Amino acid sequence: MVTNTHGADAGVDVRAEAGEAAAIHLVAERAAAKREYDLARSWLARLGPREDPRELVSVASDLWAWCGWGGFRHRFADPFHFADDEQGSAAFTVVSPDTEGATEALRRAAAVFGRVIGDGCVLSRENIEDDVDPAHPHEEGTWLHSPNYVSDPEPTPAGPHVWVDTKNFLPAPMGETMLRLLTDELVASRIPAHIISGHGDPEDLPKRPTNLIPLSPD
């Protein structure tokens, strides 16, 4: 179970050396938190083929801290749990020994991020373009809360990175769905990976564009 890198017990390194997936992810998370990305990738490379591909992917315990959320927890290979706070914007960076595969998985997930709305539903291209949620009709004159902009994956020292402009308002269901889309792509491709935000290391990130093209009227 991935919980808190900094509170990892003394035996985690021994268990990681023995190939225990949860321990490997804890050690990789600890290295990534120190910005020792090559070390993190070398640990993740030890995961090798797994009978359960969900064991290949983990999420930083402080992923949403940079988005203004305080209580985010991740249970290894279990559903994600978020704090009740609703603020910030989303950013995802994939630390992986398979940079090319991680980039393509992130690209596929990011292609859907722009159609994720505030309640976590993923709308069709037609509905998002028409600003219509058929399952949750809204009053005339209001818009769905959906991202303004989703960047293309860009290389960083940590790994491929995508950020999503959610207008400083990131409801937990929206963030949860985006994270699920990304983890599903990584798991389906059997790519060993540790997902971090990247919000906290601006010097590691590509320069963000200033002339954004909105994805929706919202």
Image (cartoon, rainbow, N blue to C red):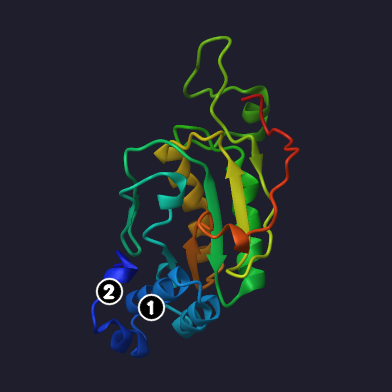
Residue at the front extreme, as displayed: 203
Question: Relative to residue 90, is residue 53 depicted above or below?
Answer: below
- Is there CB contact under 8 Å for labels 2 and 1? yes
Left/right of residue 38 with respect to residue 215 in the rendered view: left
Image quadrant assignment for residue 204? bottom right
At horizontal 60% and vertical 49% (from top left) the residue drawn is 163
Q: Secondary structure at mark 2?
A: loop
Q: Position of residue 147 (x, y in %)?
A: 59, 36
Residue at the top extreme, as displayed: 140
Q: Position of residue 112 (x, y in %)?
A: 61, 45
Decide: few, some or many residues near mark 1? Use Cα within 10 Å; few <14, some 14-19, many ≥20.
Answer: many
Decide: few, some or many residues near mark 2? Use Cα within 10 Å; few <14, some 14-19, many ≥20.
Answer: some
Question: Relative to residue 57, is residue 86 depicted above or below?
Answer: above
Q: Position of residue 79 (x, y in %)?
A: 34, 53
Which residue was labeled with disc 2? 8
Q: Earlier in the sequence, mark 2 or mark 1?
A: 2
At horizontal 56% and vertical 15% (from top left) the residue drawn is 142
Q: Secondary structure at mark 1?
A: helix
As measured in the structure, the alpha-carbon distance from the residue carrying label 2 to the one carrying label 1 is: 8 Å
User: Identity of the amino acid at label 1?
Assistant: Val
At horizontal 62% and vertical 27% (from top left) the residue drawn is 127
Residue closer to the observer: 67 or 111? 67
Question: Relative to residue 155, is residue 213 depicted above or below?
Answer: above
At horizontal 46% and vertical 85% (from top left) the residue drawn is 46
Q: Position of residue 188 (x, y in %)?
A: 53, 64
Which residue was labeled with disc 1? 27
Q: Is residue 24 visible?
A: yes
User: Identity of the amino acid at label 2?
Assistant: Ala
Residue 153, numbered circle: none
- The quarter of the rendered structure image containing the N terminus is bottom left
Q: Is residue 52 visible?
A: no
Residue closer to the observer: 38 or 81? 38
